[in-house]
Image: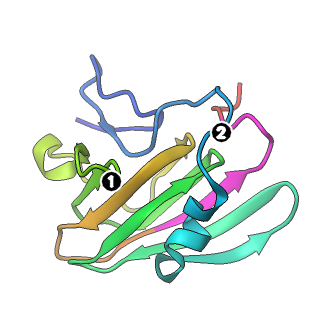
Amino acid sequence: MGVSSDGDAGSKGLLPLTGANTSAAWLWPDDLDAMIAAPEFHTILFEDDRVRVLDGRVPSGATVPVHTHRWGGVLYILASSDFVRRDPDGNVLADTRASKSTPIVGTAVWGAPLTPHSLENVGREEFRTLTVEMKNGSGNHPT
């Protein structure tokens, strides 16, 4: 079982590491942006009008509050741990323990924009990603 880069956990048996492709207009308020709603878990390493580079860190046992990632981009896995992603109502969207598919350190995957969600690190190690978000307006996987 592997990690999906497009959020498709269907017939491929893959864990959705990121959200599904979102081609519709962005509907969520700016105050849910990761840097506003959960700044203690995200650090901007670089930002301009085309990209934003985030260092995301979630210590073992921590829960990142509900937030969004407006732009799609590339996620590079620096440290891995089991996690549970939930929607704002607490419904489980992804659980790496159930899928037996923890993200692999040293891999890079495409991540579509993420609608409101929380992320709980239920593993023993820090979960850390380096994300290059593409502000190209579409947020979908490049063709």
Residue 136, placed above or below residue 10: below
**Residue 43 position (above or below residue 96):** below
Closer to the camera in the image, 24 or 113 = 24
Mark 1 sits on what residue?
A: 103
For the C terminus, the quadrant is top right
Q: Which residues are magenta?
A: 129-139
Point out the frontmost of discs 1 and 2. Answer: 2
- Looking at the picture, how far across and down is residue 86, in whole percent? 29, 51
Q: Amino acid at mark 2?
A: Trp
Q: How many neighbours does mark 1 have within 10 angstroms: few (below 14), some (14-19), or many (20 or more)?
A: many
Q: Is residue 85 left or right of residue 21?
A: left
Point out residue 39 in the picture as x, y percentages from the top left corner: 54, 78
Point out the tag, 1 or 2, that comes first from the N-terminus.
2
Residue 15 vs 50, above or below: the answer is above
Quadrant of the rendered image containing residue 127: bottom left
Identified at 20% across, 48% down, the residue is 95
